[in-house]
Every structure is written in structure tokens, then in C-alpha cells.
Image (spheres, coloured by chain):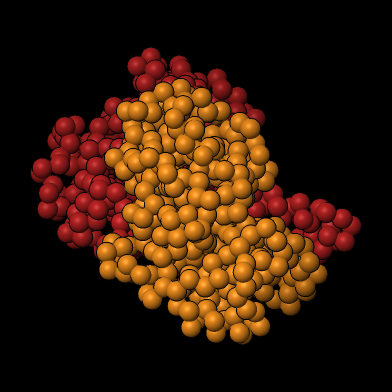
Chain colours: A orange, B red
């Protein structure tokens, strides 16, 4: 039912997306009344390309993922994921509660053969362009095998949606020469080196934004802290800059003159372009939109889902995981035949 | 012998510092020829307040800490730390190889009773002012007890040098509601809650720069990644901004008008003011200056050392650690009588 803003954002984005993209059909899953009201508001209607699938419950943004999973079997999130499982839909896009989406996706869809845990990959801007960082989905206490799987999934995502044949993969580590990282990261580096991936080696936090590699692998704890710290710095710098421009009449005038430049700068770091994190490693495509996304941003999340479906990402991930040297040892307890891997 | 730039930076900073601060004497430790050459260049001389203590070796900036510790018993770093151990100096300030400084400090000075590992605390700017983050000294694979000790040392540092009676302490964690952090962090939160510190609770990466707490506690891996990622973002944003101002004649004119504002902004985020990381938990005061510090920045590192000595920080840390509930259980194997704790 659409994150912080609900149908006013998601329904508008969907209608706009369908106008722009003839090849895609969309199912709106949620409380039918709320969806229909929103469709009327923007003078849109259902069609053979835009259906409503009812769900009677909504997972709150602050709700416990475990409670949502156990207690709300008819939530819009759960129903949408069931549509992916049954093959009626090929992907699920949600701006809802991240923890609940991960837990419910994992329960409903299960992980792919050879993948222990799903991981959330986000796109971040770099000096050169952009990079994919995973995990940002709260996978804490990761093993070296998990980090290896993240590397495989991240590289497959980039090769699928960016058409890069051998994306480079960096392992997020610390800079001290002698003491290169903790034990898990050291082991992960060895596994990645033997994985057949284009493994660049260890990288440091600043390499994320330098764009040193196409993919950055880290555990969910480190990834979350790095991302939030980055947001904090950007916020602080923008507050400082605003304050300096507002200091007196002269600086206000300077700000007025510089406004077009500042605005161009803001467009360049507009995080809406990067909206749509990929929940990887499941038997279905799931995209997490930022909860506070506007309809412009939500459109990017839909486009990402379509790209992953068209690129056959699930199939590629399965193939790559199967090629890993240690593959059979680390296969998941969730493993099942790949029946619903490429829903028609 | 002074980091990336050597005596031209450190000797100039020391001479300048002595002019400004009548109550302090300084011993320059290193290759006498290099130091004397630099003194002559800036037309300064030794005096009863400025002595040279010879050391015949220098640890390279990229040298392995273990090799430096084993192989260079007469390095400037080692000799300076020996002066602290013997009580001839009350603090050591170094812009040298971080890993070697930590390893050698730990070996020469030993840790205080109740402290297992020394931690490196840096000052970072926030929207409100600044905050102290530790560990940034590559303590990876930390236990909950280590994080507790970092909290105690960080709070003591702030109360000593900032005169804050009950500095607030935050534990760096991730944002997911249900799955709050890894096991070690969960246990550390419990220990911090029972520690008698002004424990704020869990904080997230962006809270560092919001200035939510006076002290931010994290393991050295997470701290390093967060800091480097922050530097990366700041670097990327400043590159973007410069590029936008250089786009064409009009934007260059805007940049010219806005120059005083941009410069005021730059002064505000000038990291040189924050130079001087405190290596805490040792039986002596050790300050790590940034390797690339200029003499202005190096002066701040000297001032920090003097503040810690004058505030009696080692004594305060020992007192606080002794008050911890679990203190005796977690005391260090390095423990020794506190003979050289407050060298005269």
C-alpha cells in the first residue's frame, strides 16, 4: 500500500509508468477502496493492463517484521508476493516496511538453490557514475560464504541490468596494511578470489564513492552504517552550505547568483534516480522502493523490476551460483526445485 | 620523524607551539641532522624548552607494524614512547605510520589495568559542533567488553578535555527495528546500560554527524568504513560542486561571486582543526596526527596532548574502569602496577 505516502504516490507512478511503457502490465495489490479512490482522483481507471488485486490488511511502517509475517496473512505485501510465487506476477515492487518485506519475501518465495540469505543491493552515486552495494538488508553476522554469495548476486545484477560482461567486485575492508580486516572478511577475500568473478580485491569506504568497482560487497551491519554515515555527512554539508549562504545580505545575493549552479548540483545528487533496491537471492524478483519515495522516484523502482525480469536475472544468478567451487557445500536448507524461478 | 612531510611540518609546528604556549617543553625525537637542518631553515634553535633526543631509525609510512616493532628498536617512534615510559616525557605526538604507532605503543607502554586493547578516538564535525568516535584504530573482531571499555575511555576523554561532566555515549548500530544489530553489539548495549555511563542507547550512522551523542562507540572495522565512506561522500560532493561552477562562463561568474561563501564553508569543514586522534587505554598519552597534516594541523595534535596531560586523563580512565561492575573479570593480561601512569 505504498510506504509513507500510500496510494497517492504508488498509483500515480504506476499510471504514469504504463503510459510510458507499452510492454508492461501492472497489478495493484491492496485495499480496493483506497486504490479506486486514488485512481478516480487522478482520473485513471483499471484496464486489461492495470488490474486491482484485493488485500485486506496493510503492514505498518514500524511494525515488527516477525509479527507482520505471522499475523497478517492477507497483507498487501504478502498477497503481492504470493502472486509472484504463483507466477501470476513476475516481480513485486514495494515501498513498505523493509524488514517485513525481507522476512515475508524469504518466507513466501524461498531462496534460490545455493543462496543462504537474500541480500538488498542499492545503487549509490560515484564520481564516475554509480555502483551497487550489498548487503544493505540487515544481514548481520555474515559468514564468508554469505559474502561470496553477495558478490555473485551483485555481479549478476550489474551484468543483467547494465549489460556489463564482467563487472568488477570489491570487498569492503579497512585500510591498515598488516591487519587487513576481520577473520570473516579475510576468508571471504579468498573465496571471492577463487570464484571466477572479476574480483578487484579489498576496497575501503571511500572507494564506494570513487567508483573503484561496479559492485561493493559487505555485511549488512557495515553496509547500513556506511550508508547512514554517508547520508549524515551529505546532510551536514548541505546544512552548512545553506547557513553560509544565509549569513547576511551579501551572502544571500551570492546565493541568488549561484542558485542555478546549486540546483544543477542538487539534480546531480538527486537520490530519486537511484530509487529501487534489489532484494536478491529469492525465487522471484522483489524491489524495495524507499518508503519516502515520491511518484517520480517510485517510477524508477518499477523500471528496475522490469529490467531484472527482462534480463532474466533469476536464471543468471542460479547459473552463476551453480558454477561456484564450493557450491554444493553451502546450499541453502530452503532449497527446492526451481519450478517458479521464471514465472511465465 | 613526522608522517608524510617529515621535520618541515613537525619542527615548524613545535617551534610555533612553544612561542604560543609558555607552559610546555618539547623534545624532538629523530635523526638529529634532519631536525637541526630544519631548525636552521626556520631560524630556530634548541633551548631549555626545546631539546633534541636522537634516534637512529625511522619507521616508513607503509612499513609493516610487526616488522617495525621487531626490527627497529631505535626508531624515532619507539624512542619517543620510551621517553614517555620512563617519565621523561608526559606524552608522545606522532604523525607516523598508524599501525606501527599502535603496535609499538602497546608494546612499550602496556595497557591500563582493566583495558584489553588501546583504541583510537577521533573528533568529527557535526551539525551541532563535534563528536568523538572510537575505535578507529583497527580493533577488529571486538567483544562486547571491548566496546564497553571504548565507551568508558571515550566518555573520560570528553569529560577531561571538554569539561563535560556526563558526556552522552551512543552505540553505533543499524536501524532495523526488530533485528537491532549483531550479537556483540546487543551484548555491548547491555553492558553500557549497566556501566554508570550516560548511555544514550543505540544510534545510527547519520547520528554521528547529527551530533546526537558526545561519544560514538563502534568496533574498529565499522568505524574505519564509516569514516572512509564519509570522506568519500564529502570528496564526491566537492568534486561535483566544483564541476558545476566550472561548467561555463556564467557558472564561473556565479562561482566568483559565491567564492567568499564557499571559502567560509571550507573553513568550517576544515579537518585540520580536528587533527590529533587520541590513542586511549595505554599507560601514557599518545596522540596520532594525520600523516598528511601540515604544521597548522600538527599544532592541534600537540595541543590535544597537552590538554590530556593537564586534565589527568590517565588517572581518570583508571578510576572509571575500576568502577565498572565487571571490571575484575575483564582485566587485561598486560596488567601491571600503575607506576608510570602519571609520569612527572
**Is A49 on the left or on the right of A32, as rendered?**
right
Residue A172 in sight here: no
Image quarter where the C terminus of chain B lies is top left
Counting from the top left corner in percent of width and height, residue A295 is at 61, 70
**Is B330 on the left or on the right of B73, as rendered?**
left
* Residue B278 to residue B264: above or below: above
Counting from the top left corner in percent of width and height, residue B218 is at 35, 48
Query: From this viewpoint, which residue is outermost toward the top?
Result: B71
Foreground of the two, B151 or A142: A142
What residue do we see at 44% from left, 47% from top? A340
Counting from the top left corner in percent of width and height, residue A64 is at 31, 66
Foreground of the two, A60 or B86: A60
What residue do we see at 43% from left, 56% from top? A86
Query: From this viewpoint, which residue is outermost toward the right?
Result: B249
* Residue A158 to residue B265: above or below: above
Residue A266 in sight here: yes
Foreground of the two, B160 or A20: A20
Counting from the top left corner in percent of width and height, residue A309 is at 57, 49
Query: How many numbered markers are drawn?
Result: 0
What residue do we see at 41% from left, 73% from top? A55
What residue do we see at 31% from left, 43% from top? A334
Foreground of the two, A225 or B138: A225
* Residue A9 to residue A307: above or below: below
Q: Quadrant of residue B222?
A: top left
Q: Quadrant of residue B87?
A: top left
Amino acid at each position: 500500500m505504498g510506504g509513507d505516502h500510500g496510494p497517492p504516490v504508488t498509483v500515480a507512478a504506476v499510471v504514469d509508468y504504463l503510459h510510458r511503457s507499452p510492454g508492461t502490465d501492472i497489478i495493484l495489490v491492496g485495499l480496493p477502496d483506497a486504490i479506486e479512490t486514488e485512481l478516480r482522483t487522478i482520473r485513471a481507471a483499471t484496464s486489461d493492463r492495470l488490474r486491482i488485486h484485493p488485500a485486506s490488511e496493510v503492514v505498518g511502517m514500524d511494525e515488527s517484521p516477525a509479527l507482520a509475517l505471522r499475523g497478517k496473512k492477507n497483507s498487501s505485501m504478502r498477497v503481492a508476493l504470493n502472486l509472484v510465487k504463483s507466477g501470476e506476477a513476475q516481480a513485486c515492487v514495494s515501498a513498505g516496511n523493509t524488514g517485513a518485506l525481507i522476512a515475508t519475501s524469504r518466507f513466501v518465495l524461498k531462496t534460490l538453490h545455493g543462496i543462504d540469505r537474500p541480500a538488498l543491493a542499492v545503487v549509490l552515486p560515484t564520481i564516475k557514475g554509480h555502483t551497487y552495494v550489498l548487503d544493505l538488508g540487515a544481514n548481520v553476522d555474515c559468514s564468508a560464504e554469505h559474502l561470496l554469495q553477495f558478490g555473485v548476486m551483485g555481479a549478476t545484477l550489474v551484468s543483467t541490468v547494465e549489460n556489463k560482461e564482467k563487472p568488477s567486485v570489491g570487498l569492503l575492508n579497512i585500510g591498515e596494511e598488516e591487519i587487513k580486516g576481520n577473520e570473516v572478511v579475510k576468508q571471504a577475500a579468498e573465496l571471492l578470489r577463487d570464484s571466477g568473478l572479476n574480483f578487484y580485491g579489498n576496497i575501503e569506504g571511500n572507494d564506494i564513492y570513487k567508483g573503484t568497482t561496479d559492485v561493493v560487497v559487505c555485511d549488512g551491519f557495515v553496509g547500513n552504517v556506511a550508508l547512514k554515515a554517508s547520508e549524515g555527512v551529505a546532510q551536514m554539508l548541505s546544512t552548512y552550505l545553506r547557513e553560509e549562504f544565509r549569513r547576511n545580505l551579501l551572502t544571500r545575493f551570492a546565493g541568488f547568483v549561484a542558485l542555478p549552479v546549486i540546483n544543477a548540483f542538487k539534480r546531480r545528487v538527486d537520490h530519486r534516480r537511484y530509487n529501487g533496491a534489489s532484494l536478491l537471492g529469492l525465487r522471484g524478483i522483489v524491489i524495495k522502493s524507499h518508503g519516502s519515495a515520491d511518484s517520480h522516484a517510485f517510477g524508477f523502482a518499477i523500471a528496475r523490476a522490469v529490467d531484472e525480469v527482462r534480463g532474466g536475472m533469476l536464471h543468471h544468478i542460479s547459473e552463476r551460483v551453480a558454477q561456484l567451487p564450493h557450491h554444493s557445500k553451502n546450499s541453502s536448507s530452503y532449497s527446492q526445485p526451481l519450478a517458479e524461478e521464471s514465472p511465465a
